[in-house]
Each structure stands twice: as structure tokens, then as C-alpha cells.
Amino acid sequence: MKTVYVVFVSSQYVTGSLIRMATGWQYNHVALALEPTLPKLHAYSRCNYFEPLNGGYQQETPARYLVDGNDSQIKICGYEVTDEHYERIRAALQDYQAHKSETRYNFADILIFPLHKHIPLQRTHTCISFLCEVLELKRYMTVLQLERELQDNVLYEGSIRAWVGQNFPNENEYFEQRGRLRAYKDTARKNLRLWRDVALVGLTVVFGVELL
């Protein structure tokens, strides 16, 4: 057996604050780590600090949650998997990294959040649907439901700065403010493809014809 680490994050981003305000949850984000020291967090989130609508698969570091000297609260839960499952997780993460440019944040899932449903599209997730897939959970969960599911597996809860200290790499590319035209173009390209595919899934459900 091996252990992976599910990391719940209460981020200091405006979007994170809005999510917590709307849901009443303590944590608005969840990521996966293969090491308890969190040198690398695997998640679906924004690709650039200044571009909240341009999202996809990311290999995060704690630097993202220590912006401008701020701190973020986290909860780390251990999750035991078989050796075979662990290798499947590693293979999945490698595949997501290899096809990173094809990944998209599933904003459609945000719209149907009250239904606690997930619209399945290739390499398209929210942070929680990504965790549900790689952990091979039997059912879709919300961030709060997964947190409650792992309440007996908590290894640490508190400041991310206190947990990691200064031992993490910088993310200069993530914090680079790109030209507006390039940023708008990348965001529009991803989201136009997303809503096109969401529409095709809807037609598939209505007419029973595989369109994707």
C-alpha cells in the first residue's frame, strides 16, 4: 500500500473568497500531492495569476497560495491506495502533463453545481472532478463531501506557510502578466471549445446520438 495526499485549500484569491461565501465551506479548492511536504500539487486551476478564466491541469507549488505575503489555510489528508492504483495515478498525472495544452477548466460544472453533477468531457475538469477521477472514487463528490469523507485521515490543518516554510520553488511564469491580446486569445480559445463541446453533450442526451 502507498499513501497519496489530498490537500484542501482556503485560498486568498477573490474567486476563492466568493466560492466560500456562496457555499459556506471552509475550503474552496482541492489538490493532490504525492509527497506530504507538498513540493508539487496536482490540480485543475487557473493557468496564470492574472487570468482567472483560463484554467486547466496545473502542477502547483505553495507559492501560489502565499501571494503578496499572504497565507492560506490548508488541510492535508492521507489517502491509502494499492501499489497498482498508485502507479495508475502516476501514469494519469504524466498523461495530463503531457497533454497540458489540451486541458480545460470545466466552467459548465460550476453552473450545474446545485445538482452535484459533472459533465464528462475529455481532459476537462474542476478541481474536485479531477480528484474524483484520479482517486477512482465510486461517485462524484463536492469538495465538502470529500473533506467529510476523509475526516479521519487528517494529518495537518493550519497555515500552509507554517507547514512548508520557505522550501518551495518560485513560479515566475505563473505570476508573469502577459499581454492582454495574448491572454484574451488563449482564454477565448479554450472557453469557446468548452461551450461547443458542452452543447454537443446536451444534444447527445436529447437525441441519443453520439456527436463527440
Image (cartoon, grey):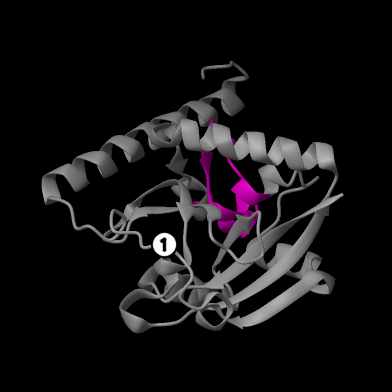
Residue 121 seen in render:
no
Q: What residue does disc 1 label?
A: 169
Number of numbered markers: 1
Q: Is residue 192 above or below residue 18?
A: above
Q: Is residue 20 above or below residue 171?
A: below
The segment highlighted magenta reads 111-131
Indicate the position of residue 65 as horizontal and vertical percent values.
44, 71
Residue 102 seen in render:
yes
Mark 1 surroundings within 10 Å by alpha-carbon count, few (fewer than 14), some (14 through 19), many (20 or more): few
User: Is residue 20 one of those drawn in magenta?
Assistant: no
* Three-letter residue code for mark 1: Pro
Q: Is residue 95 above or below residue 86?
A: above
Which residue is drawn at the image coordinates 79% and 66% (left, top)?
Answer: 150
Quadrant of the rendered structure where residue 51 is? bottom left
Residue sitting nearer the eye, 107 or 100: 100
Indicate the position of residue 88 as horizontal and vertical percent values.
72, 35
Residue sitting nearer the eye, 169 or 13: 169
Indicate the position of residue 175 as horizontal and vertical percent values.
28, 61
| Residue 115 horizontal side relative to residue 98, left or right | right
